[in-house]
Amino acid sequence: MKKLIRIVSVITLTSGLLNAGCAQQSTQKERDEMDRRKLSQQVDDEVMVGRQIAARLLGHFGAYESSPQALAYVNLVGQVIASQSGRPELQFRFGILNVDAINAYACPGGFIFVTKGLLKTVKSEAELAAALAHEVAHVNEKHMYNEIAPEKEMTSSETLVRLMSRGKSDIGGNLATMVDGGMKMLLEKGLGPEREQAGDRAGVLYAAAAGYDPLALRDLVKRMEGEAHTPNIGKTHPPFGERIAQLDKFIADNGFSKSTKAGSAVLNKRFNEALRSGKL
Amino acid sequence: MRMFLLVFALGIQSVWAAPEIVYVQAEKTALKAGPQMAAPTIGPLVRGEELEVLEKRGVWLRVRQTRSGGREGWVSKLFTSSHKPVGHATLSQEVKVSLEKASRRRESSYSVTASTRGLNADERVRGGRELFRADYDALKKMEAFKLQEGAVRQFRKSGNLE
């Protein structure tokens, strides 16, 4: 009798666990689908906010359109960096702003800008890549978006309700406020020292993972310290000295050293062809 | 009987206490022997690969590849995410209808709100209703810009960035 109880118990336990496993598999599939839809909704919201801010940045500074070669080059370098980033769901776009001040801007959803002044300041493709990587990091980590549109974690049922309402979100009514908030962050307040330093760290990693010199961002920040055209960066970013000290620590912690690729002939040639020789 | 209860409890625990899983998002990255980019490479990681998180240290995660024969090592959390990777093209195709409708509805509702009483963007800025003038033509040009097919791959290859 005891033996029979044991056999029945084993069968019951095994079948229970199998059932639980199957149920888990099926719910995992459903969860994946729900996650995907939730992600698409979040990306949709983020892009909608980002493009409004991008349109205002373009309105504020104007687009630099005199050099299609420079624009193509910035986009090529930018896409190399973006492919290494943690958000393949975003379509990154890169533009040039017609202003001599040295700066770069990131808008939610993947709209990234460098100024004409920055393009004149960078000395290599690796430095341009590093500047773009810093901005890509701001987008990936949602440094601005989380500040102007604090993310509300939706439950599955909320996601479903939102999907059934064909994506109606509560952003619409708040969009103008969010856009103004975003512009003020870009032009006046900045993202805050912690986020800027996080952008620096991620920028170094993205650039290095893409094959660029990991010390290029440090070199660029060091050079900007001595430039006259950086009043806005001084207002919206931590002091250069602090950034350099943090970068030095991060570079040392990661065991980085100067990459030999930084001086490769091909990189230098195409950098000069696109951004020098009177191209800007 | 107690033994069976113990086995049952352990079984249930193994079903419910799910480990933390992340997925590789970067196009190419590697499993490292330590929490450093300069650490020796254990092996390549491909986009979409599933990793179990064992430990967190700054921007680094100690992980185990969940596939058969998977190894342990380190990867930066910046190259991973808790959801499976979805390319922007796939994402927009899968939910094209919903996205298009949603975007149109919301953007148009925003435009209506923003263009109160028929004022255009410049007038609203001058009237103090909006702080910044928008240039949608320049934005559309930016969005329409496309690199030639395969250009990024070629650019990477010629620069020895692969």
Image (tube, rainbow, N blue to C red):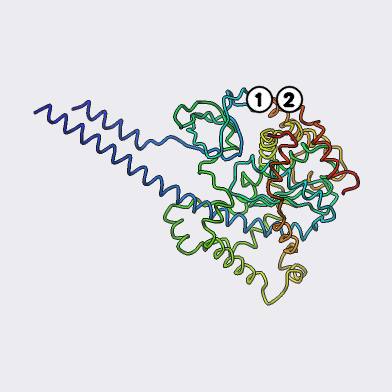
Q: Quadrant of residue B122?
A: bottom right
* Residue B134 horizontal side relative to residue B90, left or right: right
The answer to the question of whether label 1 and label 2 lie on touching residues, with beta carbons closer than 8 A, is: yes
Along the viewing direction, whichever of A150 and B26 lies nearer the viewer: B26
| Residue drawn at x 67%, y 60% as measured from the top left | A52
Q: Which residue is labeled 2 in the image?
A: A257
Residue at mark 1: chain = B
Along the viewing direction, whichever of A183 and A133 lies nearer the viewer: A133
| Residue drawn at x 80%, y 35% as measured from the top left | A266
Q: Quadrant of residue A247?
A: top right
Q: Quadrant of the N terminus of chain A?
A: top left
Instruction: Look at the picture and state if B74 lies above or below A178.
Output: above
Q: Element type at marker 2?
A: loop
User: Which amino acid type is shown beneath numbered disc 2?
Assistant: Ser
Q: Residue B144: horizontal and vertical position, in percent?
A: 70, 58
Q: Which residue is labeled 1 in the image?
A: B38
Along the viewing direction, whichever of A256 and A224 lies nearer the viewer: A256
User: Which amino acid type is shown beneath numbered disc 1?
Assistant: Ala
| Residue drawn at x 67%, y 74% as measured from the top left | B116
The residue positioned farthest toward the right in the image shown: A278
Q: Residue A75: horizontal and vertical position, in percent?
A: 73, 48
* Residue A55 horizontal side relative to residue B108, left or right: right
Mark 1 closeness class: few <14, some 14–19, many ≥20 residues within 10 Å: some
Residue at mark 2: chain = A
Q: Residue A50: horizontal and vertical position, in percent?
A: 65, 55
Report the Cα–Cα distance between label 1 and label 2. Answer: 9 Å
Residue A210 visible in image: yes
Along the viewing direction, whichever of A39 and B144 lies nearer the viewer: B144
Mark 2 closeness class: few <14, some 14–19, many ≥20 residues within 10 Å: few
